[in-house]
Image: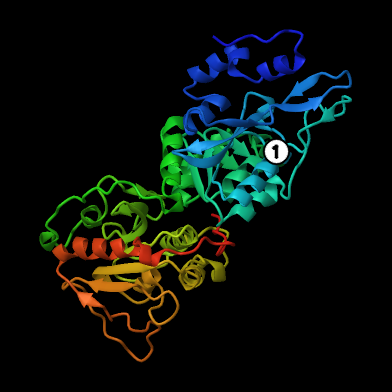
Amino acid sequence: MTEQPNPNDQLAVAKLTTKDAARPDIVTKISASGKMTARQRIAELLDPGSEVEFGSIAAASSDGDWIPEAGGVDFIGTVDGQPTIASSTDYTDHGGGYGAGRLGRLFAVAFERRWPVVLFVDGGGSRAQHPRSGLGHIETSGQIGRFSFLDGLPELSGWVPTVAIVSGPAFAGHASLAGFSDFLISTPGSSIGMGGPPMVEAALGQRLTPNELAGSEMHELSGGIDLLVDSEQSAIDAAREYLGFYGNRDTPSADPVKLDLNNLGCDYDVRLVIDSIIDRDSFFELRPNFAPNLITALTRINGAPVGLMANRTSVLDGSIDEKAAIKIGRFVEQCNTYEYPLLSLIDTPGCTTQPRKKKKTDTLASASSDLPGLTRWHTRVLLAHQQRTVPLTSVQLGQNGGLAGTLMTGVSSTRGVPLMKLAWPSVTIGQRDGFSAVVDHNAFDDVIEPNETPNRVRRLQSLLKGSGDTRPPREQKKHWIDTW
């Protein structure tokens, strides 16, 4: 039972009002909807007993009374022993619009300490000042440090992992926080957009629900989120798993699934190849329903983090369209900035672009044009590889048409040359012509039997995690990570 404060201790009373125990009706209502309160979210995310709260008091009245913070809660704690900053809006309290100055303060701490950030963001937008301002109060929750909430997350991009969880409506400033994060998780029925239903209704005269306007289900298919999961608890579990890769922290190695790769057949499932190489139960896929012709996943080999890319031949024959190119480019940036070696499994007939559907309003010129897909996005992929410094190992399983294989590895004659290029005997070798834009795309370090792949790749990865390949701590980030 929670000990009740002395009524004469106004500071303790003010702090108590921010606890779940002080508002049982609201807690019951939230629980009935299958969701968690702001404090329950934080408690599920952080290791028990590690929580240090920031900012429970927001202001002092002219009479000397303490005014509690509203709209959300902020903490520092640990996730599996890793110091982590955790912040949650509270949609039931002023629409989740709590002080932006507090977030800027926490972002400054994250920048200085290189601590990950996890944000639960559902609400109608961040507020510039406390809702009780103008009442003669003196704020105690103003900005401290170098960042505001708008420039803090962009500055953290590529420096520390930033995770956003959206499990309700997130509009305006809340949507910005979600969009700046490098890993975005959401739940069905949620929404992420810059302008909420009232703004749309005022402009267009049409009333839409938040989910109809900017539903997470739509964002999942268009690449706006990394994962769509079934509940807040699943979102928290995914956030913890994502953070588990940070800092190249090893886990106990688990032997991969043993399969006969020599007899896969032509219509093979690339997941079988993946499962035969990576540690068992270490597959953590990102954006599975966006560009499903390409798999991107964080995995482990010999207990160490590895970023994995693979063409899925069952979708578009594994060809690389504009969506897949976008997916490759950002994944390479993500792995490079957090020092995850890359493994690329290649079987693709080439690059393709999706024709734009004709509209009645199209002119003759616009009707005949394609979307600005690979004409722009394939260059973004090559730029990502050009700045890549982490090692990349590639295995060509089948085809490697045109520029597509190069998008999976980078140009082999320049910076970021693959650490090792392997091929199976069944690969399709193209004929080089005088106009080829790809140098030595048929050159391999070795041709191996499929069954030799797991042992060869796992041994090579074990060398990368050895003491001879350790790097000094970085004093500045390599680059930012592209938003979606």
For label 1, the SS is: helix
Vertical comparison of 440 with 360: above or below: below
For image coordinates 22% across by 76% down, the residue present is 446
76 in relation to 360, above or below? above
Q: Position of residue 250 (x, y in %)?
A: 36, 50
| Scheme of colours in the image | rainbow
| Percent of width and height locating residue 199 | 70, 38
291 on left or right of 100: left
Residue drawn at (77%, 31%), measured in percent from left and top? 130
The residue wearing badge 1 is 102
Q: Quadrant of residue 84?
A: top right
Spot occupied by residue 283 in the image (x, y as percentages of width and height) = 32, 48
Give the left or right position of residue 340, taking residue 280 as reference.
Answer: right
| Amino acid at pointer 1 | Arg
Q: Is residue 379 visible?
A: yes
Q: Do we see residue 320 in this rendering?
A: no
* Relative to 292, residue 228 above or below: above
Label 1: how many Cα within 10 Å (few below 14, some 14–19, many 20+)? many
Q: Nearer the viewer, residue 331 or 141?
A: 141
Give the tally of numbered discs. Answer: 1
Q: Quadrant of the C terminus?
A: bottom right
Q: Is residue 202 left or right of residue 78?
A: right
State the image coordinates of residue 269 (x, y, percent, origin top left).
22, 55
Name the one closer to the observer, 38 or 126.
Answer: 38
